[in-house]
Amino acid sequence: YIDYTVKFIVEGETFEATYHYGDTVVVPEATKAEDNTYTYVFEKWTPEVSTSVTGNAEYTASFTPVYKNYTITFLTHDGQKIEATDYHYGDKIDIPAAPEREGYTFTGWGAEIDDVTGTATFTAQYTINQYTITFVLGNGSADVVSTQDYGTAIETPAAPQRAFYIFAGWDAEIPAPRPAGDVTITAVWVLSPFENQVPGGEQNDEVIIEDEEVPLADGSLLNTDEYIAYI
């Protein structure tokens, strides 16, 4: 018998066997390891394999590269998907606009974003803002100022006092909780018509005024059941 050598070359590695004329060739499985960019699908042997031995032969495997996809996902602070995009290895990532969040300042995506090296998820990060609520008393006393985190409770000052005036409330509704922005709220004062009706009264004495209505400049009436005058 004459020996014939049949070789199969796969990515530089040689698989060979000895056959006799007319023997059936055993074709090895040809695979190529994936890398960061591609997986590889076997395409063919070159030349085409003759399954019956007729002489020495050498065959080389070829492969078709298939891009590997890597998914880059961006999430809001509470895990809602902003976008998820497939990229290839080494691609530059398109970073979405920072999502707005009331009362907070965007600080980044939680990690440095470089070119694609694998599947990754980035979540929006924030720091909470602080806002100032100022109560202007208008009675010579210092303003009451409170600077705290967004969303915290606002402590309303006690009803202020002012000689010869009735405190009629605040010029704006006091928000609850603390809003995303600085707010100034001013005390409303109405000149008291009752200071001469309290015998022996001294300045800053507290007088409870009941069942009275004080006319205001706009023609409306201020019911004094809920107010205190200081004379």
Image: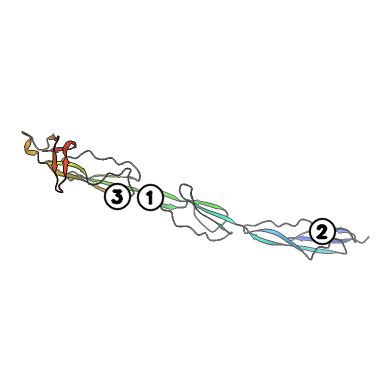
Q: Position of residue 223 (x, y in %)?
A: 17, 39
| Residue at the (17%, 36%) spot, across then down | 225
Q: Position of residue 33 (x, y in %)?
A: 69, 56
Q: Reading the chain from its start, which is encountered first: label 1 or label 2?
A: 2
Q: Which residue is mark 1?
A: 102
Q: Position of residue 189 (x, y in %)?
A: 16, 44
| Residue at the (67%, 61%) spot, across then down | 65
Q: Residues within 10 Å of mark 2 (few under 14, many from 20)?
A: some
Between 223 and 72, the residue placed more toward the observer is 223
Task: Note whether residue 144 is visible.
Answer: yes
Asked if labels 2 and 3 touch by Cβ distance under 8 angstroms, the answer is no
C-alpha separation, residue under disc 1 versus residue under disc 2: 70 Å
Camera-nearest label, 3 or 2: 3
**Rendered-image quadrant of the C terminus:** top left
| 210 over 13 or under it: above or below | above
Mark number, residue 16:
2
Q: Position of residue 109 (x, y in %)?
A: 47, 52
Q: Reading the chain from its start, which is encountered first: label 1 or label 3?
A: 1
Q: Which residue is mark 3?
A: 182
Q: Secondary structure at mark 2?
A: strand
| Residue at the (81%, 61%) spot, across then down | 7
Taking the view exactly as shown, the residue that stands out farthest to the right is: 1
Task: Note whether residue 139 is visible.
Answer: no
Q: Residues within 10 Å of mark 1 (few under 14, many from 20)?
A: few
Circle 3: residue type: Asp
Between 3 and 144, the residue placed more toward the observer is 144
